[in-house]
Image (cartoon, rainbow, N blue to C red):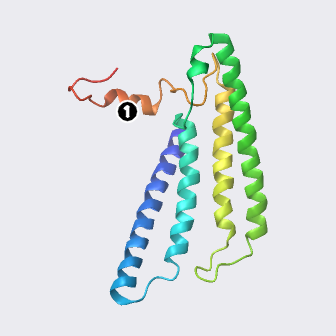
């Protein structure tokens, strides 16, 4: 079930990126070629960019692709690493919940501010933070409640969809990675 949700988020990001590129390209051609342009193109591209960033941050947290400096963490004994990994997930959960709650308040505060160019509520910008905060909260809860030794947010997940893709990809010498 969750795999389908994450896959649909990936496709949504692809669709938003494609729409942004088309909007910007058409706007540039219209502006420099015909001295006109799409009035709402810039604002729609900005809205798409906000959603791409927030959804992409959620995907990166799930895949453990955020920047992590782990030199000290890797040298710690296993039980200490497990405790620290759980504490890291608690901190991420707290930050994600704060992001979700703050963006929810801003969404409500700005929902009735309608953009004159697009006719869309300004609260849609903040709604991206609500969705990303909820996704990150779910991811951090799963990381926190995962049975066995704790895995820090930046550590590879082991057996998962991204690991299976990496193993199926041939290396530069033609052999499969394992």
Front in this rendered view, residue 49 or 4: 49
Q: State left or right for residue 110 relative to residue 164.
A: right
Image position of 156 with respect to 13: above or below: above
**Percent of width and height locating residue 57:** 57, 46
Residue at the far bottom in the pictured view: 35
Residue at 42% of width from left, 28% of height from top?
A: 163
Front in this rendered view, residue 123 or 75: 75
**Percent of width and height locating residue 10:** 47, 49
* Quadrant housing residue 24: bottom left
Residue at 64% of width from left, 24% of height from top?
A: 146
* Quadrant housing residue 28: bottom left
Residue at 69% of width from left, 67% of height from top?
A: 123
Disc 1 element: helix
**Percent of width and height locating residue 16:** 47, 61
Evaluate whether residue 146 shows in this view.
Answer: yes
Q: Quadrant of the N terminus?
A: top right
Residue at the far left in the pictured view: 174
**Percent of width and height locating residue 40:** 53, 79
Which residue corresponds to mark 1? 165
Evaluate whether residue 1 shows in this view.
Answer: no
Image position of 72 with respect to 169: above or below: above
Q: Residues within 10 Å of mark 1 (few under 14, many from 20)?
A: few
Residue at 40% of width from left, 66% of height from top?
A: 21
Q: Quadrant of the C terminus?
A: top left
Q: State left or right for residue 170 relative to residue 150.
A: left
Q: State left or right for residue 111 relative to residue 18.
A: right
Q: State left or right for residue 162 relative to residue 51.
A: left
């Amino acid at each position: 079930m969750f795999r389908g949700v994450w896959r649909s988020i990936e496709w949504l990001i692809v669709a938003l990126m494609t729409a942004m590129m088309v909007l910007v390209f058409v706007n540039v051609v219209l502006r420099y070629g015909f001295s006109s342009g799409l009035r709402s193109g810039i604002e729609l591209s900005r809205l798409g960019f906000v959603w791409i960033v927030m959804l992409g941050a959620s995907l990166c947290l799930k895949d453990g692709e955020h920047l992590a400096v782990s030199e000290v963490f890797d040298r710690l004994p296993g039980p200490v690493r497990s405790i620290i990994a759980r504490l890291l997930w608690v901190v991420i959960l707290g930050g994600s919940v704060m992001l979700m709650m703050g963006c929810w308040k801003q969404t409500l505060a700005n929902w009735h501010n309608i953009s004159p160019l697009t006719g869309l509520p300004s609260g849609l910008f903040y709604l991206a933070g609500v969705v990303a905060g909820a996704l990150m909260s779910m991811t951090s809860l799963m990381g926190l409640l995962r049975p066995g030794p704790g895995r820090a947010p930046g550590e590879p997940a082991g057996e998962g969809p991204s690991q299976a893709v990496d193993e199926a990809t041939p290396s530069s010498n033609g052999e499969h990675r394992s």
